[in-house]
Image (cartoon, rainbow, N blue to C red):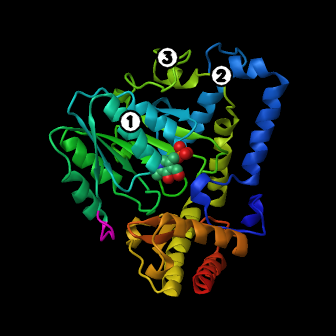
Amino acid sequence: MREHWVLDPEYTYLNHGTVGAPPRRVLERQQALRDELERQPARFMLRELNGHQPAPWRAESRIREAVRSVAGFLGSRSEDLVFVPNVTTGLNAVLRSIPLAPGDEVVIPDLSYGAIALAAGIATRERGGTLRVVEMPYPVRDPDGIVDALISALTPRTRLVVVDHITALTALVLPVRAIAAECHARGVMVLVDGAHAPGAVALDIPSIGADWYVANLHKWAHAPRACGILWASSDRQRDLHHPVVSWGSGQGFREEFEWTATSDPTSCLAAPEGIALLREWGFDAVLDYMHGLAWEAAGILAGSWRTTVLTPRAMVGAMVTVPLSEAAGATDSDAARLRLALLVDDRIEVQLHAWRGRLWVRVSAQVYNDRSDMVRLAAAVSRQLHAA
Ligand SMILES: Cc1ncc(COP(=O)(O)O)c(C=O)c1O
């Protein structure tokens, strides 16, 4: 599968989850869109893009056409979905749209992505509320342990829970459907950060039952950077606002997110090409391969480093996080040193970080990876630690 990517063949790339890596054919589609745009920029951007000045020669705007194609892949109605540049923008939109009264509480697990916890903290405090970060159990025995820990932290003042579908550092697939059901039973709204989900796990957004679901397509769904989606249940759309005020402000959910300031729309317009590729390769087969390789990697790495995998297989998607031995260090600078040594000496790009007092490696298992990549990483880490 490697031939479908422009990735440097001299390097072992095990970090797909971080910023994605669009396949060649998607990049070609994006370039074709850019070429088309630049032949008649005003016609493309003003008349065809968002339907504000509808072009009589088009049945629907270019954005709506792309949204419709993406919506099918996500199980969504196209009217409930808008493009955003990335998850951070989509989450900020929701967090800044929710009215909070003084004393209201927003709850977020301590497994959440740092920038999102930061955004949740600022938006909550600006509205007079309080952000409560809940410590989650780790190692995790099963998905129920996560639901119990999160739900038992709710109080009568909790208005909103912000929860990841797949966590960043620990790479856990969280039971978001059960979390949403338990929260709603207590009158608590649910915002899901699905940054890593589309293309990495089978996804039917409405069936999760959240109020809002935000995700990136530029990670596992093979869209060019940057392209994300924001889904809102129909009763949450009226009060949802883009964090940047522009022409569409106050005109309705879709207008507000589609009639924005000038930007390059070609990443989102090329997103259907990434989904088309997944379908051509056979999406179920892709999911099986990635999940199987991630789980195999866990065994290879933990076996080689004499550590224990702390994640149940049921909570693994296309990434897995494995602890290094305690002798590898425990600090951010230990992690940075080893990450750099692997890149410079061994030409391996992988996510490696310090968390809860030890070092961890998170590997992404994309279809261009195979077992030999995992064996190389296992040996390279052992060699680096032996040499240190
Ligand atoms: C769980 C999670 N949420 C949010 C983000 C932020 O994504 P972006 O920078 O595309 O907004 C990431 C990025 O890796 C992530 O892992």
Instruction: Provide the residue designation for mark 2.
Output: 59
- Packing grade of label 1 (10 A; few <14, some 14-19, many >=20) is some
Camera-nearest residue between 112 and 274:
112
Question: Seen in the image, is 382 located left or right of residue 77?
Answer: right
| Relative height, residue 94 to residue 310 (above, below) | above
Q: Position of residue 125 (x, y in %)?
A: 32, 33
Q: Earlier in the sequence, mark 1 or mark 3?
A: 1
- What residue type is disc 1 on? Ile
Q: Residue at x 25, y 54 (%)?
A: 150
Q: Is residue 197 visible?
A: no
The answer to if 138 sits in the magenta stretch is yes
**Bounds of the magenta span?**
137-142
Disc number for residue 33: none
Instruction: Identify the residue under disc 1.
Output: 122
| Residue toward you, 224 or 301 | 301
Name the residue rendered at 33%, 67% in the picture.
Answer: 138
Give the alpha-carbon distance from disc 2 to disc 3, as whole Å: 24 Å
Most extreme residue toward the left, as rendered?
Answer: 156
Does 221 sit above or below residue 131? below
Say which amino acid is labelled 3: Ser
Between 185 and 156, the one nearer to me in the picture: 156
Is 118 placed left or right of 275 in the picture?
Answer: left
Kindly identify the amino acid type of the residue bearing the numbered disc 2.
Answer: Ala
Question: Is there CB contact under 8 Å for labels 1 and 3?
Answer: no
Indicate the secondary structure of the residue bearing disc 2.
loop
- Residue topped by disc 3: 249
- Name the spot of residue 183 as percent of width and height, x first: 24, 45
In the rendered image, residue 166, in percent from the top left (x then y), is placed at 44, 56
The yes-or-no answer for disc 1 within 8 Å of ligand 1 is no
Kindly identify the residue that appears in the image at 65 percent across and 72 percent down: 342
